[in-house]
Amino acid sequence: MNTENAMTNAKQFASDVIIGLEIHVQLNTKTKLFCGCSTQGSEEPNTRTCDVCLGFPGSKPVLNKAALDAGLRLALALGCTISPKLIFSRKSYFYPDLAKNYQISQHELPLGAGGKLALNDGTLVHITRAHLEEDPASLIHQGSAGQGYVLIDYNRSGNPLCEIVTAPDMRGAEQAREFLNRLVSVLEYLEIFDLGSCIIKADANVSIAESGYIRAEIKNITGFKEIERALTFEVERQKLAVQRGERLVQETRGWDPAAGVTSALRLKETEADYGYILDPDLVSVDITNNMVKDAQANLPELPAAKTKRFVEQYQVKFEDAMILAAERSLAHLFETVAKKFDSSFAVRWLRHELSAVLNAKQTTWSAAGLDERLLLELFELVQSRTVTDLTARDLLQKLFERPFSPKEYVAKHKLASISDRGELEKIAKKIVDENPQAAEDVKSGESKALNFLIGKVMHQTKGKADAGVARQLIMKILER
Ligand SMILES: [Zn+2]
């Protein structure tokens, strides 16, 4: 089959892909889910541990209230109905990362159920459940595969996770990525997740119509980019297998980021294999109506609501509003700038200029950690036309390399725009005289030549001239 046919086929079947996600989000509590060990601090292996998170017989887990609060806020933000009781179960399986051979999780009654998160195109991704569970230890593989050995670090063991299970509502890897972006946005707003240090992991169910929707579950994909890559690969793999006449089987697959492929691990486990039993060490906790009401009342305005408000209140385009509202601190900065200057100025300098700098540096506004006041100082220079846009753009870049006061910097390096029209006219005259051919071309209506002369003026003034004024002056000189 040629490429063109393959692409036509891929498009034709694009709507027949079904993806569901199980996402594990690490909540940013100070201590672990069932003991007082710290979730952060020393990276020296096995130093943040105790009898509970090492799974010693006779040790007794005690629920961390902060983890419940964080989980409750997340479940509510996703529109879930909250269970009136919080109960934990033991999920039994044997794996070296689980010292007690079971993981404390929630099975029968998840903390939240029946929520949803809307995507840009109106697709609703239903949240089947959101529950709390403990993280297992981490395995550190030593030596080459097959002849090496494994070290176990229990520092991670017992970290609080919230697992979010979606219905199979996503129609491709792109929608899955958008869902994750939306979810991380909500997590950031709730301040229960640190994008820098906390990890997002996913298991994904993928199936296609041509196979009769026989699902493959891809386990343990870590990080955003990998999730999208793994899903894109798996969809293609299934399509090609069916085209070759293979019969797909329900199975669990692993993702190898280095090779960029998924491969079969084992036939799918069923829930019965986990032998869930209620954990007798943990008493059930009542989640009262008042607790739910309080948590609901304390939720911040969430990204979707903020996007809508930006469109209505500031007449911002929906796409711009969505990007500005995706990050809580950026949204706050937008409102500050829109109120101090105006909203189109704010969109231009934050949504376009600032975003471009942040994207190039692969960071976000909050992660970049720049003092907001320095940015406002720069914007004042732009607004008062003390500096040209060209100079401002250059200063914006520099601010993220090493912070400084834009006002002082402009004074020190004499970067103020040339406001003296007479001085600028002299420069323009000189440029026109030095470039007679371009001047002739402008006279015969060549806009390229005009841009060339404006460029020369900008170069001569090191970007301190207003391009619009330079244009006027050149035209004036040539009309004489
Ligand atoms: Zn512990």
Image (cartoon, helix red, strand yellow):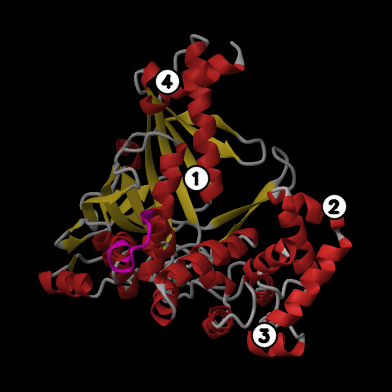
The reply to whether residue 280 is visible in this rendering is: no
Q: Residue beneath label 4, please?
A: 12
Left or right placement of residue 85 versus residue 425 in this view:
left
Dot 1: what SS? Answer: strand
The front one of 263 and 424 is 424
Measure how far apart labels 1 and 2 are at the Cα level: 66 Å
Three-letter amino acid code of the residue under disc 4: Gln
Left or right placement of residue 440 versus residue 479 in this view:
right
Local crowd size for mark 2, using a 10 Å CA cut-off: few (<14), some (14–19), many (≥20)? few
Q: Kindly report which numbered mark, 1 or 2, lies closer to the viewer in this rendering.
A: 2
- Using the image, tell me which numbered label, if any, was put on residue 220: 1
Ligand 1 is found in which quarter of the picture?
Answer: bottom left
- Using the image, tell me which numbered label, if any, was put on residue 404: 3
Three-letter amino acid code of the residue under disc 2: Gln
Please, what is the dominant secondary structure of the magenta stretch? helix
Measure how far apart labels 3 and 1 are at the Cα level: 43 Å
Q: Does label 3 or label 1 sit earlier along the sequence?
A: 1
- Magenta residues, as a range? 310-318
Left or right placement of residue 297 versus residue 274 in this view:
left
Q: Does label 4 or label 3 sit earlier along the sequence?
A: 4
